[in-house]
Image (cartoon, rainbow, N blue to C red):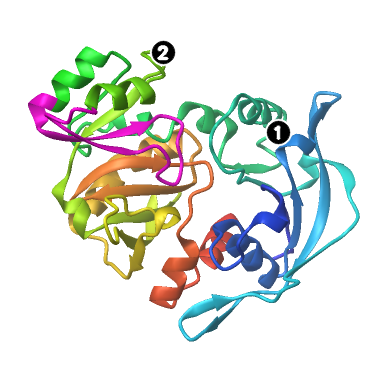
Amino acid sequence: MRPVKIAFIIDPIERLDPGHDSSVALMEAAQARGHEVWITEAPQLSVVGERAYGQLRAVHLTPVQLVDGGWVAMPAWFQLGEPVQQCLETMDAVFMRTDPPVTIPYLYATYILDYIDPAKTRVVNSPKGLRAANEKMYALQFTQAIPETIVSQNKGVIRETVERWGMAVLKPLGGKAGEGILFLQAGDRNLNSMIEISTRQGQEPVMIQTYLPAAKEGDKRIILLDGEPIGAVNRIPTGHEFRGNMAVGGRVAQVDITEREYEICRQLAPTLQQDGLYFVGIDVIGGYLTEVNVTSPTGVREIDRLNGVQLGHQVMAWLE
């Protein structure tokens, strides 16, 4: 197989954690398989002559090593070439891996990526798919997979729902890494205030899901590649925290994918493939789908470490 050229649109590389970030895992896998790895950032994209361009830099990575059960990186773990303005269609693939939130500039970047000819260059994930798939609301179409859920900015509607359910979880539609997620309980004297703050005084809708007691046992991240599950990791809340997200201190543990979770993946697969969402991380609690993460899903490093696998190599083999 001939070497291919792959561009990764990432946040500034010096801010990435090489022992945790899935983008670095994917880049290392591409490099190990003999491919050219280039990086750029969303603000460095342009459209010139009806074609998408980026200010690209070749990158060489010193791979992390597994030492005493943890990933260890060298202090100088990357080396960059000089920036070159290139048409993105000179790449065989472009990975859009900018972290959320999905802001207006993020959306503009996806419009620029629309000017890549898909017959020449595979974009992962599809810019149209990224625009279509709000990571909270996208799950609503899979009614057999999700827990009881509403989306509203109306305080009366939200309050009535919480009182009916007894306990609920509030999620901002544009949040990431557990940011802004609240546990709501009927009878809480702060309930009105929490709803007002989260909805910006009724100006912005939020998601309300019934509280799943199984959350205490963990929030499972399952990585899907072209609709097929390829690995999973359990994120378990610690201390007084009800959220399992790694960004807020959730403990990770090895876990299997259940038959119910395979069935959820089968429900999602045709829609994900239709929308060009090839590399996706879904969140499952107690057998219920809670989120579909499409912007820059994480978990690869943790799954590799706990299971002795190389998900990045599976992704590259699929791309090849």
Q: Please, which residue is most extreme toward the bottom here?
A: 68
Q: Look at the picture and state if 3 lies above or below 183.
A: below
Seen at 37% across and 20% down, the residue is 199
Q: Is residue 169 in the magenta section?
A: yes
Q: Is label 2 in contact with label 1 (beta carbons under 8 Å)? A: no
Residue 61 in the image: state x and y as whole percent. 73, 69
What's the residue type where badge 1 is placed?
Asp
Residue located at (39% from left, 31% from top) = 172
The residue indicated by pointer 1 is: 117
Residue 301 coordinates in the image, percent (x, y): 50, 66
Q: Which residues are magenta?
A: 163-190
- Along the viewing direction, whichever of 94 and 183 lies nearer the viewer: 183
**Badge 2 amino acid:** Gln
The residue indicated by pointer 2 is: 203
Q: CA distance from mark 2 to mark 1?
A: 38 Å
Residue appearing at x 68%, y 30% in the figure: 109
- The quadrant in which the C terminus is found is bottom right
Q: Secondary structure at mark 2?
A: loop
Number of other residues with Cα within 10 Å of mark 2, as a class: few under 14, some 14 to 19, many 20 or more: few
Residue 198 image point, x, y percent: 37, 26
98 horizontally vs 141: left or right: right
Q: 306 and 31: which one is in front?
A: 306
| Front of the two marks 2 and 1 | 2
- Residue 53 magenta-highlighted: no
Instruction: Give the answer, above or below, for where 121 lies relative to 153.
Output: below
Say which residue appears at 55% left-offset and 28% top-offset.
Answer: 128
| Disc ID at residue 204 | none
Indicate which disc, 2 or 1, sits on the residue closer to the N terminus.
1
Q: Residues within 10 Å of mark 1 (few under 14, many from 20)?
A: some
The relative height of residue 116 versus residue 104 in the rendered view (above or below) is below
Horizontal side of 86 relative to 200 (left or right) equals: right
